[in-house]
Amino acid sequence: MKNGINSVFSFARLGALLIKEFIQMRRDRITFAMMLGVPLMQLVLFGYAINNDPKSLPAALVAMSSDPYTRAMVSALQTTGYYRFDHVAQSAAEAEFLMARGDVAFVVTIPADFARRVERGDSPQILIEADATDPAVASGAISTLGTVANQALLRARGMQETAAEAARGQLEVVVHRRYNPEGISQYNIVPGLLGVILQMTMVMMTSIALTRETERGTMENLLAMPSSPLEIMLGKVLPYLVVGAVQVVVVLAAAKLLFGVPFTGSLSLLLAAVLVFVLALVLLGYTISTMARTQMQALQLTFFFFLPSILLSGFMFPYRGMPGWAQIFGEILPLTHFLRIIRAVMLKGAELPAVATEIGWLVGFVALFAGVALVRFRRTLD
Amino acid sequence: MNVIDVHGLVKRFGDKTVVDHVTMTVAEGEIVGFLGPNGSGKTTTIRIMCGLLTPDEGDGTVLGFDIRTDSPRIKREVGYMTQKFSFYEDLTIAENLEFVARLYGLKPLDEHVAKTLEELGLTSRKDQLAGTLSGGWKQRLALAACIMHKPRLLLLDEPTAGVDPKARREFWDEIHRLASGGLTVLVSTHYMDEAERCHRISYISYGKMLASGTVQEVVRNAGLTTFVVQGPRLDQVAAALGGRPGVDQVAPFGATLHVVGSDKKELEAALADVEKEHKGVTVTPGETSLEDVFIQFMSGSKDNMG
């Protein structure tokens, strides 16, 4: 620096580091395969597997009589798509046993006096017991019930007109399911998966990459030669940025081709956001590798970040369902912001102003991680 | 001008003083051996000299550049060979050299690499992965990579550990060839025969520099007396000698015993007693070797590595 040699940055030295890194990547076949194979495998696996709104759930029917009203009720429940009556229990005890064993998710009990009460005009009752050990399973099936049951009953009594008459002048609630009218889980899951896959592979790969140099003793040599911390950092970060780009293309193409996820927003806006996100991730990985002494420690630290990222970012569970402190925690995870951006851009067609705040967060993470990494790295010289 | 000129270097890790007021000068074209037991601070001292570590106290220059402020310049002009092989095992010999050549900005690249391969006899193996090389070849690659950018100073940290005698001999011939061309070399080692191939040696133990000079000077300054004992049942003689006042070292050398002490009179008295007690034993004055001196140093200094 002082003597006219630029010791902070030179493209030639960065080039040397990049070429070396790419050769190593190419030689490490398993890692290379993992970089491309893992995202595709996870996308297909999770994309097809995860469903937040399960349908056709096994149900047991306990019907004391087989009058027309009971039959109408059963067929109405079946047409909602949530119930699949594959057990007919003779007694409440038998139904109870079926549910305890996990054979059925619902037990629908229609009492013997159901028809009589309908005809007499008393308020008739049916009992639906749901296995709520997993609340998500039961919620969709239960929420549709009220309306479905009433309509079925009126239809069975030939009273549709009366119902329409009665409804006139009453408050009508109109619900639009925007951006995903059919409530298809994959529209939510697949874009989210891009974030999760990037989060996992990018942080893991970079966190190992630098630690490997320390562990194998090559770092000492690297430092004894004229390479600056900035060059070493970029030399590690840029190759993984390229890997991330390839993963993005693979996942987006699969989202379109395999899952038909609509892409309503601007591709360039999304790619710009992905770039910032991936940069934040590789820098996070790099920061981890300045702290970890062994590759094993680096992996452990990576997972320390990975789990909260999946659980608190809104990927698996609704962000708004979390208590305030957990939401704050979610805010400090890059994945949270990326998920908002990608869902907004892909599904809602959001433009830059709508996602500017979130992109701002990601830029902030990039600056933070880069700063920490450089400071931490200098210290490892001593 | 001295190529290495450092004063009062101190380096502490936690509450351990690994380098304790080390002063050292090395003149241009010299080959200086840096000796001392494991954990004595050799590697740390070398790392301070090439700018990898900042000393807690002390200062100095390497090649005229300040070790505290000019480490980028020092790194460009010094070739540092680490104790552990520190090139990329998943790169070939040629790729490793290309990497180094690019980092130093050597142009034209191919010419430099080809020339270095040729000089060190690596051409036939240039496409072999470094990880598959034997110890001797790895060391040759490391040396090649260190001298490719024509450094003015070579810092070699135990370069011949785990290398067979023939490869060691070749390595030292190479070092002397380089030094005759004006290169200055500081080399740390455990081997006495290697120390004797150096122009000068410095002995460091537990962070402190204990002796410096030519081999003859170091041996003479140590002030040790050595006797050679011959005769039957030397194991019993050795047992009888051990622990007597004046006897510092008793070491079997083939069919003889080397007995070393720092107080000549006490040592002679002890030997005279033993000669009387054991029949057929003869005592003759011997030559103190560098190894005797080092062992004396090692038993005399306290271990600070815990």
Image (cartoon, coloured by chain):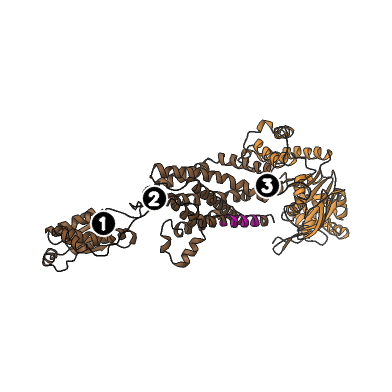
Compared across the picture, whether B101 is left or right of B132 comes to right
Disc 3 crowd rating (10 Å Cα; few below 14, some 14-19, many 20+) is: many
For image coordinates 49% across by 49% down, the residue present is A198
**Magenta part of the chain:** A364-377
Amino acid type, callout 3:
Leu
**What separation in Å lies between label 1 and label 2 (alpha carbons)?**
30 Å
Compared across the picture, whether A159 is left or right of B142 comes to left
Q: Which residue is mark 1?
A: A103
Identify the main secondary structure in magenta: helix
Disc 2 crowd rating (10 Å Cα; few below 14, some 14-19, many 20+) is: many
**Location of residue A12 with respect to A302 vertically, above or below:** above
Q: Which residue is mark 3?
A: A222
Q: Which residue is mark 2?
A: A187
**Location of residue A270 with respect to B106 vertically, above or below:** below
- In x, y percent, where is residue B26? 84, 49
Disc 1 crowd rating (10 Å Cα; few below 14, some 14-19, many 20+) is: some
Q: Which chain is orange?
A: B
Instruction: Return the disc, 1 or 3, that comes first in the chain's sequence.
Output: 1
